[in-house]
């Protein structure tokens, strides 16, 4: 494979990845607490040794899928009236206990298990400020959640929901559409702003994602057309070299 084709294939691979990410964002446009995923592209430079320098530089620039990150912008808050639907306005994450350990989430749709444990849609227990699952008693029927995370019923206080922030946000990694691995220690948010009876919507803008997908598709088509043209050029050169009449 020649150098030109290798360079354009690197772009083609990156565009395929960009298409997959845009499709994933659109699929999660209605997922509460979902943060849109974005790609970081960089050039991977390949220094050329013992060659005549072309005009411009001795380096070949390949497209590299460097990393992905999540859009930090908050989603719109939508009222539901469900006392166990909660949204965080501003900084912070809920903590839930999963089979893989403690994870962070902005998806505030919770419910009660038969034993009174407050869980998310996947059955992961919501944790309090002592990293313990929050449980509601059988007679606790009128639940109230304050802005600082305090939860109580007509029988009195039940506990306090942990609202935390990662020490290093850059080390966070997404696990599915709702959960994050902090990748390090977390700290309690000083003054959390919790809103009861409300859900944070996904921050995905469907129209914007469709525009990104269309632009990515155009770039993908251009790359494939270029590769086809290069293939035809090579084949023409081979045919002429192999033709004894030329």
Image: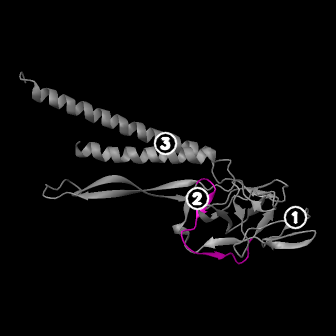
> x, y (%) of residue 236?
19, 28
Q: Tell me the SS state at disc 1.
A: loop
Q: Position of residue 128 (x, y in %)?
A: 74, 71
| Residue at 60% across, 65% down | 101
User: How busy is the neighbourhood of tag 1: few (under 14 within 10 Å), some, or many (20 plus)?
Assistant: some
The residue pinned by badge 3 equals: 215
Residue placed most toward the observer, 128 or 100: 100
Residue at x 80%, y 73% (from the top left corner): 159
Q: In this view, does 178 lie above or below 30?
A: below
Spatial CA span between label 1 and label 3: 48 Å
Disc 1: which residue = 143
Mark 2–mark 1 CB contact (< 8 Å)? no
Q: On residue 71, which mark appears? A: 2
Residue numbers of the magenta segment: 176-192
Q: In this view, does 163 lie to the left or right of 167?
A: right
Residue 102 visible? The answer is yes
Q: In this view, does 132 lie above or below 220?
A: below
The quadrant of the picture occupied by the N terminus is top left
């Amino acid at each position: 494979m020649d150098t030109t084709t290798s360079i354009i294939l690197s772009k083609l691979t990156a565009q395929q990845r960009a298409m997959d990410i845009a499709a994933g964002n659109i699929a999660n446009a209605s997922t509460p607490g979902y943060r849109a995923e974005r790609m970081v592209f960089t050039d991977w430079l390949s220094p050329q040794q013992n060659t005549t320098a072309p005009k411009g530089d001795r380096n070949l620039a390949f497209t590299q899928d460097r990393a992905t990150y999540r859009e930090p912008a908050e989603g719109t808050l939508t009222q539901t009236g469900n006392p166990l639907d909660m949204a965080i306005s501003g900084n912070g994450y809920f903590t839930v206990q999963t089979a893989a350990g403690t994870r962070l989430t902005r998806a505030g749709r919770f419910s009660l298990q038969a034993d009174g444990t407050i869980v998310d849609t996947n059955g992961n227990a919501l944790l309090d400020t002592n990293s313990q699952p929050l449980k509601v008693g059988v007679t606790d029927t009128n639940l109230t959640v304050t802005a600082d995370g305090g939860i109580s019923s007509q029988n009195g206080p039940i506990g306090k929901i942990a609202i935390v922030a990662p020490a290093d946000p850059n080390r966070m990694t997404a696990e599915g559409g709702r959960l994050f691995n902090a990748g390090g220690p977390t700290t309690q948010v000083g003054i959390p702003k919790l809103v009861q009876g409300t859900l944070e919507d996904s921050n995905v803008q469907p129209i914007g994602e469709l525009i990104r997908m269309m632009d990515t598709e155009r770039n993908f088509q251009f790359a494939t057309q270029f590769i086809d043209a290069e293939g035809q050029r090579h084949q023409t050169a081979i045919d002429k070299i192999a033709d004894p009449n030329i």
